[in-house]
Image (cartoon, rainbow, N blue to C red):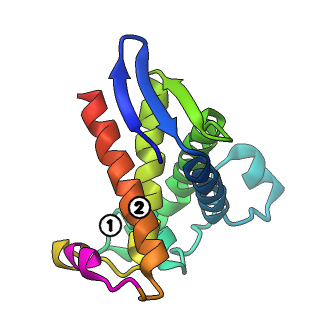
Amino acid sequence: MSNGFSRTTDGIEVVLGPLEATLLVELIGQIELLLEPPPVDDPLEAIVGLRAVAPPPPDDPAVARLLPDAYPDDPDAAADYRRRTSDDIREGKRAAARRVLATVPATGGRALLDDPAAQDWLITLNDLRLVLGTRLDITDDATADALYEIDSDDPRRPVIEVYLFLGDLQDQLVHALL
């Protein structure tokens, strides 16, 4: 098992066991794929980096949770915002995930993080928790608290354990950064 995150004189240290490291590598790979932007058909749009037409809101509720509409009460403004920013936001989250992946000790062990790397970890852990929380239908504190009372034979139990593990890691990292 991991010792998680702690502050040292050299930065933030993360210690992961082999299974935890493997799990994180797999989850980070999945979130990177999940955040892949929709294709751009127009070569000029691809070069300029700005879509002429807004991509539709994400169909996947987990992706929609990661990329919420900036203007939920104004569909036109929300579409324009997506047109201008969604690819950049996706790429920012994917880049943070790739940087985290580069610091995960693949077979377990220790890694030392500077403050920007720790911020990448915060972003990625939060994104992973949002995806799993959406999949588990966590909508408020009551549904989150109910996770601790799930029976051991509940088929959601493995996903819940991963969600709780990620939350514990995130909490340790926040405390290490204080």
The residue drawn where x is 79% and y is 61% is 42
From this view, report whether residue 154 is shown above or below residue 70: below
Region of the chain picked out in magenta, as a range: 145-152
From this view, report whether residue 98 is shown above or below residue 127: above
Q: Count up the numbered dots.
A: 2
Q: Which residue is mark 2?
A: 129
Nearest the camera: 84 or 20?
20
Can you give x and y, in whole percent of width and height, for residue 104 in the image? 60, 38
| Amino acid residing under circle 2 | Arg
Can you give x and y, in whole percent of width and height, for residue 163 in the image? 41, 65
The label on residue 47 is none
The residue drawn where x is 67% and y is 61% is 33
Nearest the camera: 78 or 167?
167
Q: Which residue is mark 1?
A: 71
Q: Earlier in the sequence, mark 1 or mark 2?
A: 1
Image quarter for residue 78?
bottom left
Mark 2 residue element: helix
| Amino acid residing under circle 1 | Tyr
From this view, report whether residue 88 is shown above or below residue 163: above
Residue 130 visible in the snapshot: no
Image quarter for residue 71?
bottom left
Q: Which residue extends farthest right?
A: 43
The residue drawn where x is 64% and y is 52% is 22
Decide if residue 122 is on the left or right side of residue 178: right
